[in-house]
Image: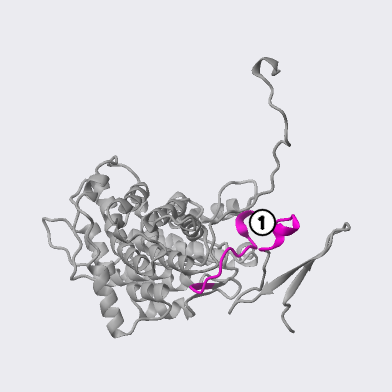
């Protein structure tokens, strides 16, 4: 069947039909180009942007029906198995996997940018000790523009590259220091001898009075968490980075806005919510009553970690993280962990229950990643901060792509106004 090249909007009055071009991408649904609709006196209404493409992008593709996630055309399963996080970051930013020389140079560049300006430690100390790490990250990342303002011309491709490198390098340090500040422990400076994942674990868990060597199994598991969360099409936080960046805002402000969006429990807090749900269930014997509650529309309880806004079959990241979950728990001797046993039983019941199967409520990546991070000793408050650390790779790739796009404009959504029509001002003494 030949794909349509135009669509026609007709009206049930005498208004003239409107013809609009239909565009096709490499993969995915065709889109109707509605950019000229305003000239005809009408706009579209699409709350939540469920059917609206706000940009062109060649970075990430999701097929929700097939359960497929591609970074620059590469299946996520292959990248998670064969690449490290910086290779994947290079791919997202540059469109191709690096060769040996490019990988060495890129890694060296990121390593050389991991330290923070000394005065940034004063920014941390302006927060309460019990401040949430995400609140601290938003503030500190936003403040980077006051320290690294030598390369913030967003219309200069070289400046964009320098800023992207700085963000990718410094956000792990900021995230780890946010945790250290909570604890009241000294900040640990990054170590150039460690890889990206190991360095973050060192800055989080090491203390000056003891030697610390990252466990290679845990470091590789953490690397997979980063790879699986590096980008995910035009989700809320990525769209936020693009919208803020569309005004010409500097990259640090744009990414800080993305972190703020990610902090929302409907977006980045799902793995933390899953762990809290498992703790609320508490015991395998109580699963039945919670399954019953999940089916009850009048009950506010929701089974966290199952289903996904985009995926209508298995989340491709979930199978990778399930395997990683077993590897971590075996390495730590936690295969008898009560929360893990509870999670596996809940997974088994949900996958066999017709209610969940018919609705395609499969376990998603958050169902397993929270268990992995808990086993590694990462506190719940840091789960979303680590998500932000991973997603920075995608954010800066998307931000750079947008600024390089000659068609990009400042974001300005329309609205369906439902307020009062024009009315005249009434002096206060005449108001009833």
Q: Is residue 7 left or right of residue 176?
A: right
Whole-percent x, y for residue 56 in the image? 55, 70
Whole-percent x, y for residue 370 in the image? 40, 60
**Residue at left offset 48%, top offset 73%:** 59
**Residue at left offset 20%, top offset 62%:** 190
Residue 223: quarter of image: bottom left
Quarter that holds the C terminus: top right
Please provide the residue range marked out in magenta: 35-61
Residue 385: quarter of image: bottom left
**Residue at left offset 55%, top offset 67%:** 407
Furthest-right residue in this view: 14
**Residue at left offset 44%, top offset 64%:** 399
Residue bearing the label numbered 1: 46
- In front: 92, or 385? 92
Is residue 262 at least partly visible in the picture?
yes
Q: Secondary structure at mark 1?
A: loop
Residue 199 among those drawn in magenta: no
Q: Main secondary structure of the magenta part?
A: loop
Q: Is residue 157 left or right of residue 351?
A: left
Whole-percent x, y for residue 208 in the image? 13, 56
Whole-percent x, y for residue 316 in the image? 50, 73
Labels in figure, total:
1
Is residue 340 at least partly visible in the picture?
no
Colour scheme shown: one colour
Furthest-top residue in this view: 429
- In front: 344, or 90? 90
């Amino acid at each position: 069947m030949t794909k349509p090249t135009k669509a026609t909007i007709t009206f049930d009055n005498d208004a003239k039909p409107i013809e609009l071009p239909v565009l096709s991408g490499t993969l995915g649904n065709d889109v109707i180009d509605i950019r000229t609709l305003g000239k005809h006196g009408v706009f579209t209404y699409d709350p939540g942007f469920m059917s609206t493409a706000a940009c062109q992008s060649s970075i990430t593709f999701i097929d929700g029906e097939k359960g497929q996630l591609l970074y620059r055309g590469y299946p996520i399963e292959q990248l998670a198995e064969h690449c490290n996080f910086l290779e994947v970051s290079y791919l997202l930013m540059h469109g191709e996997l690096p060769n040996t020389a490019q990988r060495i140079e890129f890694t060296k560049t990121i390593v050389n940018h991991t330290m923070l300006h000394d005065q940034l430690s004063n920014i941390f100390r302006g927060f309460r000790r019990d401040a949430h790490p995400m609140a601290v990250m938003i503030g500190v990342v936003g403040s980077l523009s006051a320290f690294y303002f030598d390369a913030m011309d967003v219309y200069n491709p070289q400046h964009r590259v320098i800023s992207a490198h700085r963000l990718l390098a410094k956000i792990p340090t900021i995230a780890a220091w946010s945790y250290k500040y909570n604890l009241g422990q000294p900040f640990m400076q990054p170590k150039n001898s460690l890889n990206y994942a190991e360095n973050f674990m060192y800055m989080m868990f090491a203390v000056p009075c003891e030697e610390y060597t990252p466990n290679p199994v845990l470091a590789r598991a953490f690397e997979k968490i980063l790879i699986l969360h590096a980008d995910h099409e035009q989700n809320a936080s990525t769209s936020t980075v693009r919208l803020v960046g569309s005004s010409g805002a500097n990259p640090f402000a744009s990414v800080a806005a993305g972190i703020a969006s990610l902090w929302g429990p409907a977006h980045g807090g799902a793995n933390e919510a899953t762990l809290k749900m498992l703790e609320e269930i508490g015991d395998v014997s109580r699963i039945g009553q919670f399954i019953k509650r999940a089916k009850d529309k009048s009950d506010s309880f929701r089974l966290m970690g199952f289903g996904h806004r985009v995926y209508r079959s298995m989340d491709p990241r979930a199978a990778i993280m399930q395997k990683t979950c077993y590897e971590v728990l075996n390495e730590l001797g936690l295969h008898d962990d009560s929360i893990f046993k509870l999670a596996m039983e809940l997974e088994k019941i949900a996958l066999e229950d017709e209610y969940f199967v018919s609705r395609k409520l499969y376990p998603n990546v958050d169902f397993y990643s929270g268990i992995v991070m808990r086993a590694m000793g990462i506190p719940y408050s840091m789960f979303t901060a680590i998500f932000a650390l991973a997603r920075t790779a995608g954010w800066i790739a998307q931000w750079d792509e947008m600024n390089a796009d000659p068609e990009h404009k400042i974001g300005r959504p329309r609205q369906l106004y439902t307020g009062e029509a024009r009315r005249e001002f009434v002096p206060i003494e005449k108001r009833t």
